[in-house]
Amino acid sequence: MAKPASKAKKAAPVTAKTPAKTPAKTTVKDPAAFDVSGYSKETLIDWYTTQELGRRLDIKAANYLKMAMGWSYHAPFAGHDGIQLALGKIFRQGTDFLFPYYRDMLTSLAAGVTVEEIIANGLSKDADVAGGGRHMSNHFAKLSVGLQNSSSCTGNHSQQAVGTARAIKKYNGSEVVFCSTGDSTTSEGYYYEAVNGADREKLPIVFVIQNNKYGISVPVHEQTANEKVSDNFRGFSNLKIIECDGRNPIDSYRAMKEAVDYCRSGKGPAMVHADCDRIGSHSNSDNHTLYRTDEDIQAMKDRDPLPRMRQALISAGILTEEQAKAIEDNNKRLINAAADAVEPLPDPAPESYIDFVLPPAVIDYHDTSESRVQPAADAPIVTLREGINATMMEEFRRNPNTFLFGQDVASFKKQGIFNVCKGMLDEFGNDRVFNAPIAEDFIVGTANGMTRYRDDIRVVVEGAEFADYFWPAMEQLIECTHDYWRTKGQFSPAIVIRLASGGYIQGGLYHSQNLEGTFTTLPGLRVVMPAFADDAVGLMRTAIRSRGTTMYLEPKFLYNYRPTSSAMPPEDYLVPFGKARVRRQGTDATIVTFGTAVHWSLKAAETLAQEGKSIEVIDLRSLAPWDKELVFESVRRTGRCIVAHEDKVTGGFGGEIAASIGQELFRYLDAPVARVGSKDTPVGFAKTLEAATLLSPDDIEQAVRTTLAF
């Protein structure tokens, strides 16, 4: 392990130009070389070898673009050499967790991604270890060593990184998390949430800001109050901020070591602010000469870290000119050999797009036999709310690596605004059941990160106190939905997101909304909505035990609604995803429904039965996936279908059901498929407005009558 110098000299600007083309031929007259004293010869040679190899790969990527062979997205790292080399080298493969961003080619190379793996990523080959060509080129990852697969959404991996650091602290681990970003990321609200959460919880995470002073074409002074962006975070009491010259590997390693030592002390997170240059354009789709002066560009080239590092080693007697040339020639051979090996490899098979959308559930989707374990003779009768509560209790006892957090879930005596979490804090303690800031994105993002630490971790979050407040968390939800697909099955967060959904409580705006119409459009997300206590139990248990993200929607009007009650099922009772349930059999028409609308449909069916009309009611329970087989079988028999849901008609999930029936069962239909739901307006607060807006049993009854009369 290298020993850092006690103090690195401040580099003076280089006055000569840096020739382009290939770094192996780069020469500088009298460069302001780095002070390499205090480091072993072996370490310094290894660093230069890696740095030079990375720069050659950067040029190779640009050449692939010119040849139209791949790397259709390339963000060059030249000018970030020092901090990226230091970050990759201080990272411990197989121990620490590193969340890179799209410019981190040298970071990734230094952290353990091989030349072949980098080229396979750039060419989007099936052999790409990051995800088999499913993610953009220049997005490097290698989960087997701890290098995480980060999104293109600028800096949103900061939330996940904090979640992983939280898990490390809870398990008293010695690992450190590194979150690498550019300066523009710090303008995002979720980055502030991440830093705030890490500071409050004193987590072992190093935030690395590679400040090249441009967000594509937008200069840093137009993005933030402080051009030294780390100054924006100086109010955090537990955050240690360290500055360095991000061009200089020596100074950068000094800063990274100081940051890691601080994190391991348990005092809190660290932030390394690295002053960098972006010598090239933002990416291959950008031309920085349109917004930067020739003088600015030349000044950056004069500060080029590669020739300065080379000169430092030669001046210090670490390398001779011939030895440096030998390293460079060998790097060239390595890249050419890797290119020859990777270029013929197959691209992803077109038909493989369907693979890894959802991880396997604890019960296979196509299992036709629901686990119908009978309740014990003395089983208590529970409401939907009590069933959810009891199931979470049972699953927390079963798996000690299960956690619950959200807003108000762990406040003394209160424990959830609807009492769904009541008693959990008392039994499992504040280490496993804890409150979160009023930051929905942070809640979901850190849940994702926590499940990266151990495969047996399961996280249940109250995504928002009311479903209406969940919208800020949508970008982290999107991450959860395609983690499994994007990594080609290597990672899927094991999260259950609970949301109190719907109206009928005189909640008005922000307390009465239904979001399932949006959630069901997202591939990779399971969406369930129980209407009875036993289904609430079985679906919650299946969701917690399964990998993947499940949106568990709880119709809050039904929490204590007595018709939902049932005997508490035993602890091995599971309800499969994608399996509906016939609530009432019939022959004249089929109502397909879910949530609160199930009970309104049953009321309407009972009224119509008194007139001799036989109406079948199907409770979907699971919306994504949904049970086409059962629904289609019923509609084939009855010839008529009404889809009823609490959500507004336009954009509601019922449109998907109706379209599927119309497309696949047209010849069986004796009437058009009807949809009935709430009005296409916001939900008013006054009871009269709420009643006029939301779906009612009378609305469903009228829709059935119209369909029967067609």
Image (cartoon, rainbow, N blue to C red):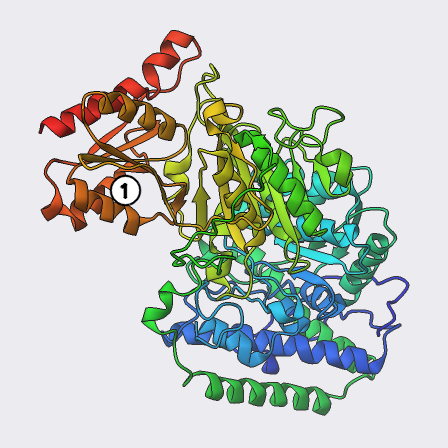
Which is nearer the eye, 229 or 175?
175
Residue lying furthest front in this view? 377
> In the figure, 509 relative to 483: above or below?
above
Residue 610 seen in render: yes
Question: Where residue 518 appears, x then y in whole percent?
Answer: 39, 39
> In the figure, 111 relative to 100: above or below?
below
> In the figure, 107 relative to 632: above or below?
below
Question: Where residue 440 appears, x then y in whole percent?
Answer: 58, 36
Q: SS at mark 1?
A: helix
Residue lying furthest right in this view? 6
Left or right: where does residue 606 sit relative to residue 283? left
Question: Where residue 647 appears, x then y in whole percent?
Answer: 35, 29
Left or right: where does residue 98 sit relative to residue 333? right
Residue 26 falls in image quadrant: bottom right
Quarter of the picture containing the N terminus is bottom right
Residue type, mark 1 in image = Glu
Which is nearer the eye, 9 or 326?
326
Q: Mark 1 packing: few (<14 Cα in 10 Å), some, or many (20+)?
A: some
Residue visible at 75% across and 69% down in the picture: 92
Residue 383 falls in image quadrant: top right
Residue visible at 82% across and 41% down in the picture: 238
Quarter of the picture containing the C terminus is top left
Which is nearer the eye, 648 or 119?
648
Q: Which residue is mark 1?
A: 656
Residue 182 seen in render: no
Report the number of numbered marks. 1
Question: Where residue 316 appears, x then y in whole percent?
Answer: 83, 80
Residue 13 falls in image quadrant: bottom right
